[in-house]
Amino acid sequence: MCQARGVTNVPPSTIVLGDGTSALIRPIEPGDAPALAAFHGRQSPESRYRRYFSPKPNLTDDELERFTNVDFVDRAALVVEQHDEFIAWASYERWQNRGDAEVAFQVDDGHQGKGIATLLLEHLASIAQDNGIDRFTAQTLGENRAMLSVFSKAGWPVHRRFDSGVIDVDFSLDETAEFIDSVERREHRADSRAVAHLLLPSSIAVIGASDRAGSIGAAVWNHVTATRRIRSYAVNPRLDEIDGQRCFDAVGDIPDEVGVAVIAVPERELEATIDQCIDKRVRGAIVITVIDPDTIDMPSLVSRARRNGLRIIGPASMGIASPRPDVELQAALVDVRLPPGKVAISMQSGTLATSLLRQAAHLHLGVSWFVSLGDKHDLSANDLLQFWEDDEATSVVTLYTESFGNPRKFARIARRVSRSRPIVAVRAGAALLDPANATLYRQTGVIEVPTVTAMLDTARVFAHQPLMAGNRVAVLSNSRSPAVLTEATLTQAGLAPVVAPVPLDWTSTPDDYHDAVREVLAREDVDALLVVHAPPSTDDVNAPSEAIDRAAAAASKPVVAVMLGAGDGPLRPGSDIASFSFPEQAAAVLARIDAYSRWRRTEGDESAEDVPANIDRPAAEAVIDEMLATGDTGPLLARRLLDTYGITMAPTRRVDAADAVAAADELGYPVAVKATKRRVGRSVEAGIALDLTDGEDVAEAIAIMREHLGDDASLVEVQQMLPPGVDLRIRVEDDERLGPIITVGLGGVQADLIGDEVSRLAPVSPGVARRMVEGTRASGALDDDTLTLVSDVVARLAHLASDHPRLQELDVNPVIVSDGRCHVADVGIRLGIADRHEPVRRLET
C-alpha cells in the first residue's frame, strides 16, 4: 500500500472543461460549509434526488461538517469553482478495512454536459491510488443515465449490478492503456475547444484602442477593424469614439457578449483590466502589453484568470491572425498580410514576428494561422497543437520556442500530431541549451531546423509536396557544374543522389524539361526530384518554370527546384513547387523530408504501450520497497529486480571475503570478484579482479583487496565470468522535466569516452529499442538474433524505469552479448522519491 499523502499534498489546480472554459479544482476545506450549502440550495429537486436518493431540500449541519472535514486518506472531497462559486463537488469514502471506496458526484444544473464529473473522477482516483485504494464503487439510480455515462466513458472496465431501481457499479483504478487513451482524448477535445474560443471569436474588444497615429492601440484597432467579419468594440475611457465608432469606458460597459479581448494598456492598468474581463465573462485575452515581472505577479494573475474561465495569450504577444477566407482575423499589432494557405505559425518571440512575416510574404507562403505566444504564461504550443491537429486547413505546423512549459505533455501531443502532419521547429534560449530536448524532438517526429529561414523553407515544401518512400534523389540539370555540386550536397545531407539519364544542356527547351521531368518521376529508383536550372542568359532565369510545373502536377514524389539567379519563392506564381537560390537549401529540406518520412514509416505508429511479455510490476515494486527499507541496492536485490522484468543477470553471490573461494567453486570458474565498497578504477587494488581461474587466484585477489581497502573489502561479490563478446551500456536516468530517458551505446571501461550513444524517452516499444541499438557502432558486431535479444533488454529496462518512478537511475554496464546470449554483468541503481503519477488533466503551471 502506498503511503498516504494528506491534504497538504493535494494542491489546487486549474482544469479545462469539456466546453473549453477553465475552472479551479481544489480540496474541500472546513470553511467551505456555507458555499456547499449554497450550492446544494441552487440545484433542482431532481438533481438533489439523484445525488441523495431522497428529496433533501437542505443539508444538515452535521452533514456539512462531515462533507467538509476529510483526511484525504480514507475520505477525500474536491470542489470545482468558477467565478468564486461552487459548480461541482465529489467525494470518496473508503469502505472499512478494505481497499475500495465509494465515490459520489454532484454537478451544478447549469454546468452539466461539460465533462466535470469525469474530471473529478480522474482527480479522486489519483488521490485514492496514492492512499492504497485500488477500486471505486458507486450507487446510482437506473434513470440517471448521465452518471452511468461518466463511469462507462472514463476508460475503466465497469461492472454493473441492478437491484430495485438502483445500479451498483464498481471498477478497478488501474491505469490501463485504455484509461490513459480516454484521458488523452478528453484532454485533446477540451484543449482544442479552449483554443477555439481565442482563435475563432464571435466578437473582439480592443482595450486600449486609440486614434493616435503610430500608437500601439491605433495599430491593433486598425488591424482588427480591417475586416468587418467579426464584431469589434473599442475600449478607452479617454475617448468617446474612434473612426465614428463608439468607444466604451470599460469592457464591462459593452452591452453584448465579448469573446476575446485584445489588451494594449499601460502595465499599471493590466491587472485591473484582466479583472474587468473576468467580471464580463470574457473567455480569452490577448495581452500585447509588455510587463516587468518584478512589478506584476503574472503567475498569480493567470491563475486568477484561469479559475474564472479566462485564458490568456501573452503578455508581450504580437497577436493572432488568420487570412483564411472563412476566418479573416487580424487581432495583431503587426500587419499580417499573407495569402491563405496550409501552414500554421507559432512564435514565442514577439520581436522576431515582424521579420518572420516579411520573409514569409517574400516567399509567398500560404498561412492558415499566425499566433504570437509572447512570454507564454498561459496558452502554450501544446494547446495550439491540440487545436491544429483537428484543423483541416492546417497541414504543416511551425514552432519557434524558447522554453517548454510541460515537456512530457509536449512529447505526448507532438508525437500524436506528427503522425498526421509535420511539425517544423526552431529551438532557442533555454530550449536550445538542454540536450534532452534534442531527444524529445527525435522521438516525437518533430523536425528540428537551425534557423527561422530554414523553418520557412521546410514548411513551404511540406505544405504542397508528398513524403518520400526512400532517400534516392534524382538530379536533373542543364549544366554539369551545378549538377556535380548538387550531388555532393545531397550526399553530405545523407541522401543518395541519382544521376538522371536524361540529357539536358544549355540548349534545352521548356518542352525538353517537361519530358525529362515526366521520365525521371516515372522511374522506380527515384524517391524525389531536384531540378537545377542554370540559365544561359539572365533573360532565361525562369524559362522552363511553367513546363516543370506542368510535368510535376499531381506527382507522387516531392519535386523541388533550384533556379539559379531567380531567388527563393514558388517556382512561379501559384506553383506548388518551391524554388531555392542554391542547392544546399534544397538538399537540406529534402533531407528533412526523408527523415520525417522514415519516422512516419517506422516509429510513427509504434506504441510505447507494446509491453514485453513476462513483466511482474507488483513483484518489482516489492523489491524496490525492500531496497528502500534496507538501503541495499546490491547484486542480490538487483538481480531479483531485473528478474521481475525478464532480464537475466550473470550469476552472483555476495559473501564474506573468507567465503569467496567457496562461492567461486559453487559458481564455476572463471569468476570475477568485486569489493562491495571499491575505489575508482578497475584494478585489484581498487576492488575488482577479473578472469580468476581457480581458488588460488581468488584467495590472492582477496588478500590484495584487504591490503589496500581494509574493512571495505570484508564483503565481496563473486560473479561468474561471461564469455568475451560485445559490451554494451544501457542507462536510464530520470529527467525532472521529461521523465526517464534511456540511452544505449558501447559499454565497458571506455564507455564514457567513446560517446557512441542513442537516447529516447522511456518507455519504448521493442521496435524503437531495436532501432536504438541499430544506431550504435555495436550493431555491426551483432547478428539478427542477438540484435533482437539486446533490443528486448533495452525495451524491458525502459519499461522498468517508466513503471517505477522511484528508480531514479539504472546504469547497466556492461551488458555482454556472447554465445548467442545477453547477460547483465553489473548494474548500478539509485533510488529516490518521485511523482510521475500524472493521468489527470490539469493546466500547465
Image (cartoon, rainbow, N blue to C red):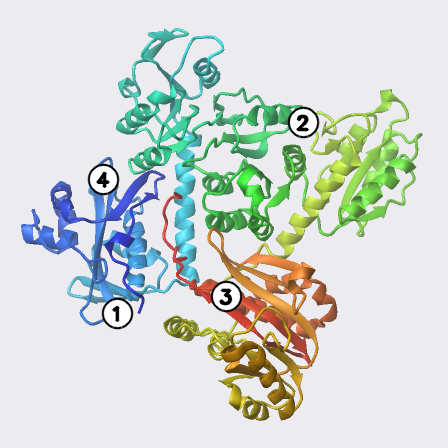
Residue of label 3: 799
Question: Percent position (x, y) of residue 295?
Answer: 36, 27
Q: Nearer the viewer, mark 1 or mark 4?
A: 1
- Mark 2–mark 4 contact, CB under 8 Å? no
**Sooner in the amino-acid sequence: mark 2 or mark 4:** 4
- In the rendered image of this protein, does residue 700 appear above or below residue 280? below
Q: Say which residue appears at 6% left-offset and 50% top-offset.
A: 61
Asked whether residue 12 appears in the rendered view, the answer is yes
Whole-angstrom CA distance, mark 1 to mark 3, is 26 Å
Residue of label 4: 110
Please tell me which residue lies in front, 63 or 407. Answer: 407
Determine crowd level at label 2: few under 14, some 14-19, many 20+ residues with C-alpha closer than 10 A: some
Whole-angstrom CA distance, mark 2 to mark 4, is 50 Å
Q: Secondary structure at mark 4?
A: helix
Residue type, numbered disc 2: Leu
Question: Percent position (x, y) of residue 60?
Answer: 5, 50
**Sooner in the amino-acid sequence: mark 1 or mark 3:** 1
Residue of label 2: 363
Determine crowd level at label 4: few under 14, some 14-19, many 20+ residues with C-alpha closer than 10 A: few
Whole-angstrom CA distance, mark 1 to mark 4, is 35 Å
Whole-angstrom CA distance, mark 2 to mark 3, is 46 Å
Question: Percent position (x, y) of residue 633?
Answer: 46, 73
Residue type, numbered disc 1: Gly
Q: Nearer the viewer, mark 1 or mark 2?
A: 1
Residue of label 1: 99
- Give the left or right position of residue 82, taking residue 505 as reference: left
- Mark 1–mark 3 contact, CB under 8 Å? no
- In the rendered image of this protein, does residue 101 appear above or below residue 500? below
Question: Percent position (x, y) of residue 176?
Answer: 41, 63
Whole-angstrom CA distance, mark 1 to mark 2, is 63 Å
